[in-house]
Amino acid sequence: MINMIETAFENIADNFMKLKQKSSVVEQIAKIWIEALGNGNKVIFCGNGGSAADSQHLAAELMGRYKFDRAPMPAMSLTVDTSALTAIGNDYGYDKVFSRQLKGIGNKGDVLVGISTSGNSKNIIDAFAVAKEKGIRTVAFTGEGGGEMLKSADICLNVPSSITNNIQEMHIACGHLICGIVEAHFFANQNKDHKAA
């Protein structure tokens, strides 16, 4: 068992070393979020399964706090309203659960972040199409292949793994990093105490 554990940690460490190659992509995404939030717009997240949990997690980091106390930054996840999800899924089909919500609440200048380990989630691809119609920037978090989202997003962070759990580990780490960069950009000068909650 100890060998299995040690090997797992070694694989995770190796993945994160490879992830350094995506530093410029992470920087570009941070700049997109900063531009949107600086203009009074919001960051909207969506994903399925574990990626739905990551969507909610990252939205909460912006709306609540990440490393220090500050004003909330407008962010939300399209995965949290079960009444909307089930109504839209029932009436229009599961592929429309994010795009229909985005049609109702998305505004020009917002950012839509779609999280999918495969990069082929049809409901996210559909939401990206709506986003483009509305002037909303699109950011994809995917696995190494990128899938269809590599083509449909304005920018794609396709992390260097094809294994679902490892992709998710890197997604949340990159999301945390971006949240930290954004938070520091807007609030570091007024917050000298960086104690975590």
Image (tube, rainbow, N blue to C red):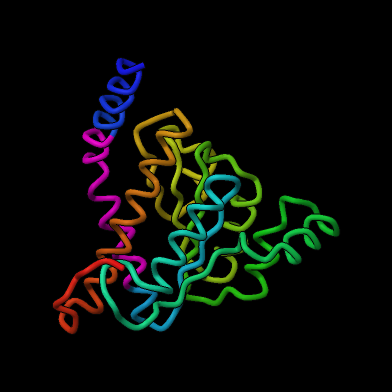
The quadrant in which the C terminus is found is bottom left
The residue sitting at the front extreme is 1
The quadrant in which the N terminus is found is top left
Q: Position of residue 80 (x, y in %)?
A: 62, 63
Residue 2 falls in image quadrant:
top left
Q: Is residue 143 above or below residue 34?
A: above
Q: Looking at the magenta stretch, what is its main secondary structure?
A: helix
Residue 169 drawn in magenta: no
Q: Residue at x 52, y 49 (%)?
A: 152
38 sits left or right of 129 in the view: left
Residue 67 falls in image quadrant:
bottom left
How many numbered dots are placed on residues in this image? 0
Residue nearer the viewer, 104 or 77: 77
Q: Residue at x 43, y 74 (%)?
A: 63
139 sits left or right of 50 in the view: left
Residue nearer the viewer, 92 or 53: 53
Point out the stretch of residues depicted in magenta: 16-34
The residue sitting at the right extreme is 91
Q: Is residue 117 above or below residue 46?
A: above
127 sits left or right of 54 in the view: right
Q: Position of residue 38 (x, y in %)?
A: 33, 80
Q: Residue at x 51, y 66 (%)?
A: 44
Q: Position of residue 5 (x, y in %)?
A: 33, 23
148 sits left or right of 43 in the view: right
Residue 22 drawn in magenta: yes
Q: Residue at x 36, y 42 (%)?
A: 170
Q: Position of residue 157 (x, y in %)?
A: 38, 46
